[in-house]
Amino acid sequence: MSGGIAMTNGSSDAGVYKTVCVIAAVIAFLYGLGFLLVPQFQFQLSQDPSPVTAGWVRWAGGMLIGISVALWLAARDPAKQRPLVCGFTACYALVTLALLYSALSGEYQGVAWYIWTPIVINAVLTAAFWWLSQKYKAVL
């Protein structure tokens, strides 16, 4: 299986991989729908006084929905998905760091739960994808 992911425990490892991908896909899809279809509602939930127009964040909704599609498809066949695992590890780590910076620097001025929820979600996804990247080594 050249270029694939070596799974040490066979189907149980594939099940863990699929579960992580499906959970990440559902989260990305729900956030994506929110930003794409109802960004003003997202702003109201955050209670951040910064004036932002809906058009500025709708693109993020489209990207998140696209990411969820990639994750959903990757969950169906984990054997050759190491590049996605590594990419999503970096993606979720950078999102976590960006949100954490906004929260700690005072940049974000809305309600705390609205920023800390995605910080925790993305930190957990970072850890899960990092774990997967370490567990499933590329076959030479």
Image (cartoon, helix red, strand yellow):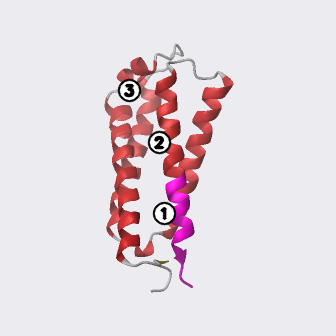
Judging by the rendered image, the residue that carries numbered circle 1 is 84
The label number, if any, that marks residue 107 in the structure image: none
Q: For the stretch drawn in magenta, what is the main secondary structure?
A: helix
Please, what is the three-letter code of the amino acid marked with disc 2?
Ile
The location of residue 58, given as percent across then percent down, is 41, 33
Residue depicted at x 50% and y 63%: 85
On the image, which quarter does residue 74 sit in?
bottom left
The location of residue 128, given as percent across then percent down, is 49, 56
Callout 1 touching callout 3 (CB < 8 Å): no
> Would residue 63 be found to the left or right of residue 107 on screen?
left
The label number, if any, that marks residue 39 in the structure image: 3
Quarter the C terminus occupies: bottom right
User: In the rendered structure, which disc, 2 or 1, sits on the residue that comes first in sequence?
Assistant: 1
Callout 2 touching callout 1 (CB < 8 Å): no
Q: CA distance from mark 2 to mark 1?
A: 19 Å
Closer to the camera: disc 1 or disc 3? 1
Callout 2 touching callout 3 (CB < 8 Å): no
Q: From which residue to which does the magenta span run?
A: 127-140
Whether residue 68 is visible, yes or no, is no
Residue 125 lies in the magenta stretch: no
Please, what is the three-letter code of the amino acid marked with disc 1?
Leu
The label number, if any, that marks residue 121 in the structure image: 2
The location of residue 15, given as percent across then percent down, is 35, 67
